[in-house]
Image (cartoon, rainbow, N blue to C red):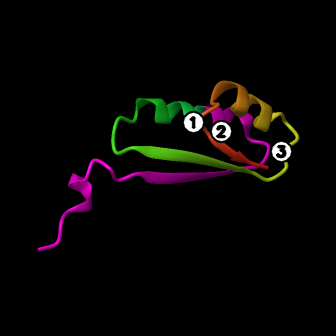
Amino acid sequence: MATDARADSAVEVGVILLTLDQKAKTLRCLESFERVQAPPYRLVLLDNASSDSTLEAVEARFPEVIVHY
């Protein structure tokens, strides 16, 4: 009998966010994840060479987010 993956507390969700010069929207989006309790998740931000200091703001406010530039 197959098990339901939703019932497995070890399930981890990966969330990939893409951004380019959208610092305010990106920070708001990441802030919204602070309210998520389950399932466990990991955030990855892919920044496409933003020139509005998005990368620095995310790294300062959300050190747990994996950032690729």
56 with respect to 51 (left or right):
left
Mark drawn on residue 26 = 2
Mark 2–mark 1 Cα distance, whole angstroms, equals: 6 Å
Residue 13 in percent (x, y) is at: 43, 53
Task: Report the residue at 51% width, 46% height from top.
Answer: 42
* Element class at badge 2: helix
Between marks 1 and 3, how big is the CA–CA gap? Answer: 17 Å
- Compute the Cα span from label 2 to label 3: 11 Å
Residue under label 3? 50
Q: Is residue 6 left or right of residue 31?
A: left
Extent of the magenta region = 1-27
Quarter of the image where one finds residue 51: top right
Q: Are marks 1 and 3 in contact (CB under 8 Å)?
A: no
Which of disc 3 and disc 1 is earlier in sequence? 1
Assess whether mark 1 and mark 2 are in contact (beta carbons under 8 angstroms). Answer: yes
**Residue 24 is a magenta residue:** yes
Q: Secondary structure at mark 3?
A: loop
Question: Which image quarter is the N terminus in?
Answer: bottom left
Label 1, secondary structure: give it. helix
User: From this viewpoint, which residue is outermost toward the bottom?
Assistant: 1
Residue 3 drawn in magenta: yes
How many other residues sit within 10 Å of disc 2, few (<14), some (14-19) or many (≥20)? many
In terms of depth relative to the viewer, which is nearer, 65 or 16? 65
Which mark identifies residue 30? 1
